[in-house]
Structure formats: C-alpha cells, structure tokens
Image: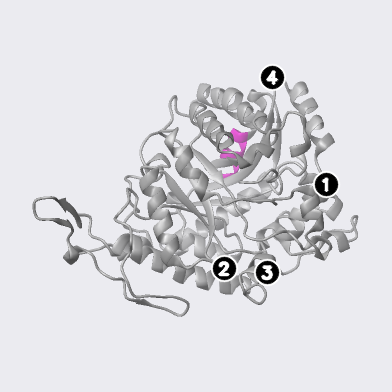
Amino acid sequence: MNTPSHLSSGLWRHPRDRSRGYRGLEHWLDLARTLEAGGIDVLFLADVLGVYDVYGGSPDAALRAGAQVPVGDPLQLVPAMASVTETLGFGITASVSFEHPFPFARRISTADHLTNGRIGWNIVTSYLSSGALNLGVDGQVAHDRRYDIADEYLEVCYRLWEGSWSDDAVLADAASGVYVDPGKVRPIAFQGEFFRVPGLHLAEPSPQRTPFLFQAGASSRGLRFAARHAEAVFVAAPSDAVLAKQVAAVRAAVAEAGRDPDSVPVINQQTVVIAETDATAHALYREYLDVADPIGAAVLLSGWTGIDFSALDPDAPLAAQGSNAIQSVVDAFTSADPSRVWTPREIADYARIGGDGPVIIGSPETVADALERSVETTGVAGFNLAATVVPEGWEQLTQQLVPELRRRGRRPAAPRSGTLREKLGGAGARVTETHPAAGFRHTP
C-alpha cells in the first residue's frame, strides 16, 4: 500500500524498517526490482479512500498509529515500476463507489499500454463512511446496493474497453492522412440506472483491453458479484478450516454463475516471517511484536468490520452482526469456524502482524511445508503475501522462500512473461469467451 503502515501496525517504528520512504520513487523502484529478480508474479497494491475513524468515533487513533494514513494513489506508482521491470505484474485496487467509469476506463487503458499488458484491477466497493462523506455522499451506501452499482459500473467499462474500438481501427496511414478509421470506432450509447455514457472510449485498444480482474467479495452478494466478474478471488481466512469453506463457497458461486470453477483461482492473504531456522524465525517474530501496535490493529479492525472495538468488552466473545463494511471479516472471527471463539482482545493481538490474515513463522522449509499443506487441504491456488518490516520482509520472500519453493517444483525457474492474464494462467491476453466482458466485443 502507498502508505507507511499497511497491515502490520506499528512496524514503521522498527529500526530496520524503511517504509517511511514510501513518498519517494526510488523506494518503489527498489521494491519492483527486488520482486522481479526474486520471481514474484504480481505486486498487489491495496488502497482505501477515507480514514479509519470508527475506533473511538474519531480519526485520531488512526493518525497516531499511521494506520493506512497518510495514503497515496497506487496507480501513479505503476508506470515507473513497469519501466524498470519486464515480467512483474501489478494489481491495483480501485473503488467503483466514487469515480465515474468513463475517466477510470481511460486511466486503466493507459496503464495497460504503459505496462505492456501487466495491469490488473482489484475491484472494490468502498466501505469507509469517511470516504463517502468527503465526496458529498450523505453516509455510506448500503452494502448490497453498492454491488448493484458495481455491476453496472463493470458493464460500462466492458463496453468501453471491449466494444468501442475495433482491433484494426488505428491506421496511422501517413499517405492518406488517416490516423483512425471513424467507421471502426463507435459510441457505447449506454443509459443505465446509475450511469449515462453516450460516447466512445478515448483510448485505443490496449494489450489486454479489459485488465485482469481481481475481486474480494465474500458476503453472499459479494460472492455473486465475484462469481460473475472475477478472474481471481482474494480472501483473508485466519485458518485452514475457514479457508476451505471460503474456497468451496467461491467455487460453488462460480459454477452457479455458469463459469468453470477451476478458471477462478482463490488466493489467500498470508504473512510469513522467515529465518534460517525455526528458532531464529520465532525470535525475529517476537522482535516484530515488540514494536507492533495493538491499538493500530484495533483501528483497522474497527474500520473493516464497522464495529468500534474501543467500545467492546475486550474479553467477551465477539458476536456475529450485520455490517455495512466488510462482512467477511466479521464472519471470519464469529461464525466461520465454530470450533474457535474470538474475543476483541484476541483478535486485535492476532491482527498486530499481518492484519486479518494468518501468519506462518519458521525456516524456509517450515513455511513451504505449511503453504503446501494449505494448498492440498483447502484448494487455495496461491497466496497474497503481506509486508512486515520493509524491505526485510521482501528479502525473506525472494531470497529464502522462493528458492525453497523452486526446489519443490512449486515455482517456475524464471518469472513468467507475457501479459498479466497470460502470467496467471490465461490462454491469451484477452478475457475468455465465457467471461461477461467478451459479450461486449466490437463486431463489424
């Protein structure tokens, strides 16, 4: 995340941490080079439009902790990182809630051109009321209604990306003086409940046209949205028991939507702390915990769940409840695993390192064993590995974990090339014929 503190609250205080350098471009160029050299597929950049002000009813605790504030725009980082890499993909979080699809579609097409097709979009519906209020919306839109808006938003984008320009519209013919054949570009003439877009897409077709689509909806309405649109689904399960249920739910929803469940991999949020031996890794983890901030973790949890953790009995079980925020976070700590009862104190302690996702601590062999076991027992396809101390955490991944996974045949010897869609298993650069975006392709 383009911020000094993403999921592991307080680690910006660690003496070896350099995350405060996030304001400078060299910080991101170094990260991109490290990840590509280390064989990582995708750099995923989270984002949030708003400040975490549920805890205590004020942004003060978030500001003191640096809990995802200050935070910069993620997309502006990508072209620079793409310029110093050749194979690293980029997943960008952007919300459908507050930006009109017409300019957004152009920004993504531009990024797809500048990265040679290495861009992906993590589709989110913003959950912080503070963001809504600052954009003139009187309070947060109801959870399920946000997904109704998102469905229409995606249709507008698909029509612009896939249907406005023919593949051969750009002639650039100096002899005739024609740059674009007007007969091969058409307005989308869209009129919906939430958006009206009569005109044509401003950008010519990019390598992927539609970016690779990530999504993280885990509520019943979010799952229906993900099953229709996503090419990969993010989850944040605190245990393999919960993860197995979430993977099964995604696969069932994808099948119900008429798509192949095997075509939509599930990727779990995961934090790893790695050292040469298990003992040294656990010592390193304790070192991280010494500077981790439980209040900062509670601030994030309050924002994610819509529940003010400062007002709860810290030692009473957290009760299941509805929320206009991220319902899956509440479910993960209440109803998803009947064998585990969580209190607010335990949840905040758990979330100090790695947020709402699990942590694996140990030698490269121990961590690889745990990841393999998770894949084999839950059906999860891969992992979205969260930062700890920066850049130390990235170096643990690239210098210790990836080589061990390569020895086991779990990672390719060299980074995959091509567009992001091709890197992540697609047959080509474009969405498949079974994806809804394909239904809007430009035809003569």
Neighbour class for label 4 at 10 Å: few (<14), some, many (≥20)? few
Q: Earlier in the sequence, mark 1 or mark 3?
A: 1
Q: Earlier in the sequence, mark 2 or mark 4?
A: 2
Q: Is residue 334 visible?
A: no
Q: Which residue is mark 1?
A: 294
C-alpha span from label 1 to label 2: 31 Å
Question: The residue tagged with tag 3: helix, strand or loop?
Answer: loop
Q: Which residue is mark 2?
A: 221
- Report the Cα–Cα distance between label 4 and label 1: 28 Å
Tell me which segment is drawn in magenta: 371-380
**If you read the primary sequence from the N terminus, does the residue marked by circle 3 or circle 4 appear first?**
4
- The image's mark for residue 276 is 4
Looking at the rendered image, the disc whose residue lies closer to the viewer, 1 or 2, is: 1
- CA–CA distance in space, label 1 to label 3: 24 Å
Answer with left or right where residue 121 lies relative to residue 435.
right
* Front-most of residues 148 and 185: 185
- Does residue 363 appear in the picture of this structure? yes
